Image (cartoon, helix red, strand yellow):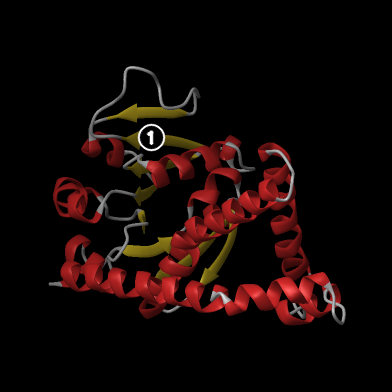
Amino acid sequence: MKKTKITIIGTGNLGLSILKGLLASSLKKEIEITATKRKLPDKPLIESQQVQFTTDNVWAVKGADVVIFSVQPGQFPQVAEQVKHLLNNKVIISTITGLTLKALEQTLGKENQIVRSMPNTAIAVSQSMTCLSYNGGEESIKTAQAIFNVLGKTLIIEDELMQAATVLGASGIAFWMRLIRATTQGGIQLGFDADEAKAIAIQTALGAASILSENVNAHPESEIDKVTTPRGCTIRGLNEMEYRGLSSALIKGLTTSYEMISQIKVNMDA
């Protein structure tokens, strides 16, 4: 059976996470991967016979069925100029922050099937929430879903919502890491050593997320009600957190990130 050839242009944090996730996924026997990096390190980024690393974007794209652009926004125009003449009949996927479908079409050509995606770094452990938008090519979106569904979950959204999805889903990894860190620090103050506190914090966060994930009718507030009792310690703690601004701080952090990413979008479209 012919293997699907996937080229990842740019193997920084996100590109490398996608690569690792694909190699650990159920697709690994069905794909061949070529990955590019501006400067190859002395030590291989990853040990696998299924991956070829190169600094040559043109060579990497020539034989590909799927091309994933995972470079920084400022690097994209130069990279696109190198390879856009080779993109006919290929599925094109972008993970580039702030680069709209319209901008991608203007740079790469409206005739191409283009998918804009926003995964997060949990893709390396097949737990990404990846939002997708596309310019009408049914083959392209099916291919993108096939790739990203083995690396977590996908959601097709309007392109206008992709900036918000970036904040909620991609930046959201950092926000949740900070919450887990704070919970761990609190556990240490309560008497646990650091490893114990982190283990409890991680599994509890995973459990809370799993409750909501496994039951579509569940709501955070109804699940909170199951834990709180009149005059109990949980409601006292929750009320103190809200008094200190927990929810408002989180919402303000999200909206502040959105304001910043909206500026990046304007600059890219200019």
How many numbered marks are there? 1
Q: Give the answer, above or below, for where 233 lies relative to 206.
A: below
Residue occupied by mark 1 = 34
37 left or right, relative to 75: right
Crowd class of label 1 (few under 14; some 14 to 19; many from 20; radius 10 Å): many
Visible in this render: residue 2? no
In the image, taking residue 180 as reference, residue 16 lies left or right, namely left
Residue drawn at x 71%, y 77% as measured from the top left? 220
Where residue 173 sits: x, y (%)?
Answer: 51, 57
In the image, is 5 to the left or to the right of 238?
left
Camera-nearest residue between 218 and 31: 218
Q: Is residue 141 left or right of residue 25?
A: left
Residue at (30, 69) in percent of width and height? 261
Residue located 48% across and 69% down the image: 168
Q: Quadrant of the C terminus?
A: bottom left
Q: Nearer the viewer, residue 91 or 245?
A: 245
Instruction: Report the front residue among 169 and 241.
Output: 241
Q: Visible in this render: residue 201?
A: yes
Q: Position of residue 257 (x, y in %)?
A: 36, 69
